[in-house]
Structures are given as structure tokens and as C-alpha cells.
Image: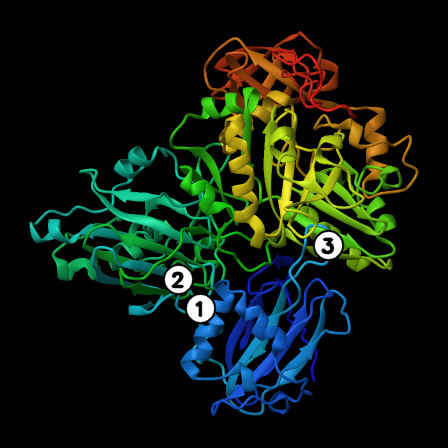
Amino acid sequence: MEQPDFIEMPRSGKGVFMPGLPLLPPGVERHPIPGGGSRAVELGAGDTFWIVDREGMQEGELVFFDVQGRARAGYIGATGSGLPTRLISLLARGGPSGTNVLRALSTAGFDLGRAEAVQIFHGGSSPADHLAFQADRPGLLIVGAVGDEMSVDSSVPLTELVLYVRRVKKQNEKGEFALPDPIGKPIYEHTILPGTAHSYEVKKGQYIQVIDVRGRECTDFQAFSRSDLDRGVESGIDQGATRSMTGTFHPTPGLLSKYYTTDLDPLLELVQDTSGHHDTFAIACTGRYYEDLGYFGHKNCSDNISNALSPYSIRPRRGWPTINFFFNLLQNDPHALASGEPWSRPGDFVLMRALTDLVCVNSGCPSDIDPANGWNPSEIHVRLYDETESFKRSVGYRMSPSAVAQDTKETPFHQKFADLGAEFVPYSGYFLPAHFRNTTVVDEYWAIRDKTVIMDLSALRKCEIIGPDAEEFLDGCITRDLSRLGIGGVYYTAVCNETGGMIDDGTIMRLGQHNFRWVGGSDASILSLQEQARKSALNVSVRNSTDQLCNLAIQGRNSLKVLASIFEPVTGRPAVSELARFMFTIARNGGQNGTPVLISRTGFTGEFGFEVFCHPKDAVTVFDLIWKAGQGFALKPVGLSALNIARVEAGYVTAGAEFCADRTPYDAGIDFTVPLKSKRRDFIGRSALEKVAVHRKRTLVTLAFETGEDVVPGSPVFSGSTRIGEVTSVCRSPLLGRTIALATMETASAVLDSQVAVGDLDGNQKRFSAVVRPMSIFDPSRLRVAGIYHIEESAPLVGSQRS
């Protein structure tokens, strides 16, 4: 059987490298199976398929039914292993993927209880191991990523398998890419060829899906109120009205939540977007554009839109204002506009809901003289779905440029926080509470400082590093010295690249002699660790456990009392009250057979507090226990907005603000994470950091402003006329009653209590005076995070303290 040479392989050309376009060659499909999930795919006779274990050590179970409902392993050239008991157990757990598989089985009338299963990877597997099969007849393939659910003290998460199918008969004979499967039951669809436009009517409540079939193709979109057209009034989407109503003045690389007419009537709302990068408003390409470049008579979107709208007696225009889906409009340094290749991939789409009866139009952009369509115009496809369909709101998220876009996920605690009035925002591929409707952000902030709060931080990335060589491997990847970390301990550390720049910061927990858990802010750190493990000859595995572990932060002065009243440590583990800072324990509620949790003495607020980890199936139980116990201590829910204020006051850093791949831990002010003198082991970025350590050019400080005006992250910091730094994060500090900011500055100029100025507008026309303060203007001695309060209590909350 031939080897799969297409897995995650980017297209490349002469001096050009294009990750993710396409992910696969013609005739090949990719179907991910989530850990603990399943997938049903129809196959034809002669179709070849591969199952790939992306991260290793993940078992699978297959069943293949022919069209008569007989399931035999020999139909795919495999050896049977009895009834598919593990797949049946997996489907009984429920979940979105299992629901879809059960629906497919029910529709076909197939019975898993009479099927013959094929076990795969049951003898152990390494990352990227794969098995190949071929169907000798048409039928339905069921694949499950099976296994026991992960507990908080385990290091064996359920991870993804990927099914690749190479069709004997390509599903799309006309071109390289097949249309993605409908996301519901379409009531209308139409393919728009490049150089054409198409108009269509949409009823109130119906959904419009605009699909970029091959990727890198633009489409201009406009919509009109049907009732206004019947009255002879052309009420279309208006740029100025929409920007004013949504508070977005400049075009941004994304879409707006709603689109309005000049009378401020809403026409559409955004539901899903898998691309995430568009020019929200410009003008469709015009005949004049091509004429001025010497391409006389070239097809253009504006004329095509006018022709498509003529049946509705809408007056033609030489230049149509439109939403430019998938268009990549750039703004260069002199503030001139230019276009680049779109970011969209094959099958990317935008889903909108009609808020009134509409007449809509889409173009297939014909531009082949610039990068607007990747130099190769292609098809756009439109599908309509009935108002009875239900689609969750989502913005596509990719772990890496070559990864398949994932829908924005709800955490296992989502409904609990929704019931408390949470307003959610997309954060790193998940919906997290930003703030709560029955309070203000400032009130939430003071709850952090004066009371006890609960937060959903399940979007933090988790992975398990296990194996006999796990310590040696990790010690070569992180900046801290793991030989000094005992079982039950936690280190805050950094993961760097070869130049010393930070990939991510996070914590490492030592669960056992050869078992570690990483908790970081982004997928970049996990992908980096997995890449290093693939290159290494060490006996170690790195497996993503993000969706197997959800976590809450319980922060504030009574957090210990809340948790200690609920959870008892398992045998041999310390009680919650005995935890020093940067330590964790395993505990249960209701005795030694109760709900298990991992509780760590960590947090991101600058306050005394804990983080609680549990399996998603236990999320509601754990939340209810904590919420009930917390009512005696005025426990309050808070969101990301209040958390951001608290972390800026405390001088805590975050990715994309205080650090990035070009900034070292020294630039981010976390020098203590790089113990070059005590850590003898070489690690990634060490040689570069040793050079930086001798001449530390930059450091992180807090700036306290006299003004109450808004200061923008990225603003330059000046000493006189000399630029000496850059603002990284800003907040209005309720504690000080003034604006404060974190800023990375030249070390020589970062003198405490010195005066600096932050530039506004072009950096020179307007300046804000500021005073340089230490990184943490809130509790710089870290007494509060140690549990020492000088308000009502005169003694620490816990006896065992460790910085």
C-alpha cells in the first residue's frame, strides 16, 4: 500500500512557500476525529484511506458496513477483533461527533451490535504513525478515537486521529477542489464563476453561506431591503452607517457583527466566519480601475453587480460599495491602500442571518492582473438555509497556518457563566466571559481585590509530557531548571526559540517522576514541544490535553476557605490549606471515590488564590460545588476585562503584548525564569540569552500617567526626542484612579521615578507625561499573593509560604 505523502504538506513553488494551500492534493479528503470522538464517512469501491495518529499513543476502532448493512473487517483488507464494544461505549457518552455518527447509523439502518470491529494502534504508536486500508466495495466507515476518559492525575489524554481518503472517483470532476459539505439542509445554492455576478432573494431569518471554493478568491457582496425596493427605495448596506453603529471607523481584518442601511435599519448579522481576514468595506473593482492600467474592456465586479441587480430595477453604478469578503486590503506606512493575496483557504466561508427580507448579490471577482485573487480567479458558491436551522456563532481558529480551521468552542463551564449573565468574546478559539451584565467591569475588579471571584480559564493550553526521558527532554526546552522541581511542584517558566525570543510563558507541573503537565497561553508552545519531541531521540511523548482538562480560577482573600470546605486531599497528598505558592494537590469531594480535581496555588491576578482543574464531564458538578460554597463568602463571577486590569496592575505579562518571538524574557521583565548560573543544562535559546544577559538592552516597567486620556498599546515612549521604548498594555487603574501602562524600555532609561513621555497621533504631535514605576504597582512586595492582608487580617491566611 502506498505511503501517504500528502499529510500537512504545504504547496511550494519557485521561491514561494504557501502553508495550507492546499492542505491536500486533488481527490484527497481530510476528516479529523477528535480524541474521544468519532466520524462516519461514506466510501466507494476502491477508495484508499489512511488513519494517522497525530500525537501517538491513541487507540482507534473501525467498523465498515457495506450497503446491505453487513460489517466485516475483510471488506477493508483487515483482521477482525470481535464486537466494537469500545466504539459502542464511546458513542454512549454523547457529544457532537457521536450524535452525528448515531444519526448516520440510524438513517442507514445499520446495527453496531452485529458488526465486526478492527482495532488499530492498540499495541502503542508513535506520533504520525499511520495505517492504510482499501475498501473493496461501497459502504459506510465508522472511526472512533477510543479510550478511557482522562482524570486530572493522569497523563494519558485522548487525542486526535485523522482519516485521509483518496477517492477512485473524484467527487468534483470539474476542478481541483470539492465543495465542503453543507452545514445544514440547503434550500438553495448557486456557483458563481469568476467574471460574473448573481442576485438572489433571502427571507427574514434565513441563513446565507458564502463559500470560497478553491481559496484565495474575493467576492463583493451587497444586500437591499426587499420591502424598501417594493416602495421604490434602494436601501442597501451602507459603510458609514454600519461603522457608526458598530463603533468601527477604519476597515479591519475581519467582519462586523451587523450591517445597516443609511436609515440605521439592520439588514444582516454575522454568525460564522472561518477565514477571519477580510476587508470589511471598500468598493467593488471597476471598469475604470482596469482602464487606467491599460486593460480596456476587462470584466469588473461593479458592472457585473449592476447587471445582476437590473431585474430588481436597481439603478446601475460605475462603482459599487460592498462588503469585500476574503479581500486582503493592506494599509502601508504612508497610509496608502494596496491589496495582497487573500488569506482564505479552500472551503472557507462566511455565514450570515437575514434580519429582514432581502435582495442580495455576490460577484466572482475577475481580477487576474494583481494579487487580489491569488493571480488565479476561481469560483464562489452561495448556499441558503432555512430559518429553522440552528448555527452557533463562531470565528475560525487555526492552531498553525497549515491546520484546519476549528469553530470557536464553548468551554464546559459556558452555560454556568451564561446563566450568571456573562457577555462572551472569542479568545484563542474559545468563548470566554468578558464581563457580566448585572455589574460593571470596575465592580468586578474590586471583587478581585476585596472579595473572592471565580473565572473560566479553560482556554489555557494544556499538554502532557511523559516518558523515561521526559525530564531531560523538557529541561532542554524550557528556561527553568527541572532538576529542582519535586513532585507536586509548579514552575513558572518560558519557552524560547533559538534567538532567545519567547514562544510562550506558562507553568510546568510535576505529576510524577516521569510525568509533567504544561499549562500555557497558546498553541505555539505545544506545537514547539511536539516538534522538538519528533526531532529528539529521547523516549518521550508530548500530547495535547487542552480539551481533556478544563479549569477555573478561584482568586481572592477567601479562596482558601471556599475550596478547603469542599475538597479533601487524596491519600498521600497535602491539604489545600497546606499548599505553598506554586504547589498543587489532587483532591476529591465526597470521599476517596468522589469527584477528582487538581488544585494549584497559582493565579494571574496578583491576589492570593488557586486554580482548579477537572475533566469536562465533571465541570458542572465542580462549578456547582464551588459556587454553593462561595455564597457564604460573596463569591462573584468576573471576566477577562477585569482580569486584564488586575494583571496589568500586578505586572504580569501576556503573549502578543509584553512578549513575542522577537522579545526575550529579559525584555518582558521575567529575568528570574532564566537562571543561567544555576541551570547547567543547555536549552533552546540559551546561547542567545547568555549574550543578551551581559548587555540587557530592554526591560519592562510600569508607567503611571497624570492624564486620564486613553493611551494606546504600541505607542512610542520618549525621553526628550529620543525613542526609548513602547507601550505594551494599558488600563485605567481603579486602585490609583489613573491610567497606567506596562512598557518595554531601554534598560539605561528605565530609571525608577524618572519622567518620560508617551507619544500620541504620529508620536510627536501630542505627548502624555508619565513616571517610571516598578513592574508591579500593586503590591510590589507580593504580600497579597502570599495571603498576607493588612486590612482586617493581621496574619497570613496560610502558614506555609514560598515565593
Front disc: 2 or 3? 3
Whether residue 147 sits left or right of residue 437 in the image: it is: right
Amino acid at pointer 2:
Ile
Instruction: In the rendered structure, find residue 154 and report the number of the disc placed on it.
Output: 3
Instruction: State the residue position of label 1.
Output: 180
What SS does tag 3 mark?
loop
Q: Is residue 628 above or below residue 104?
A: above
Seen in the image, is 575 located left or right of residue 403?
right
Q: Residue most toward the left?
A: 231
568 in relation to 10, above or below: above
Q: Position of residue 608 (x, y in %)?
A: 65, 25
The quarter in which the C terminus is drawn is top right
Q: CA distance from mark 2 to mark 3?
A: 42 Å
Q: Determine contact: label 2, label 1, CB under 8 Å.
A: yes
Amino acid beneath label 3:
Ser
Q: Looking at the rendering, which quadrant does residue 166 occupy? A: bottom right
Query: For the residues marked 2 and 1, what is the alpha-carbon distance in whole angstroms?
Result: 9 Å
Q: CA distance from mark 1 to mark 3?
A: 37 Å
116, 749: nearer the viewer:
116
Q: Which mark is residue 211?
A: 2
Occupied quadrant, residue 348: bottom left
Q: Residue furthest front?
A: 591
Q: Which structural element holds mark 1?
A: loop
The residue under the point 72% across, 27% down is 667
Position of residue 464 measured from the top left corner of the image (x, y, whole percent): 73, 52
Type of amino acid at the residue the image marks with label 1 = Pro
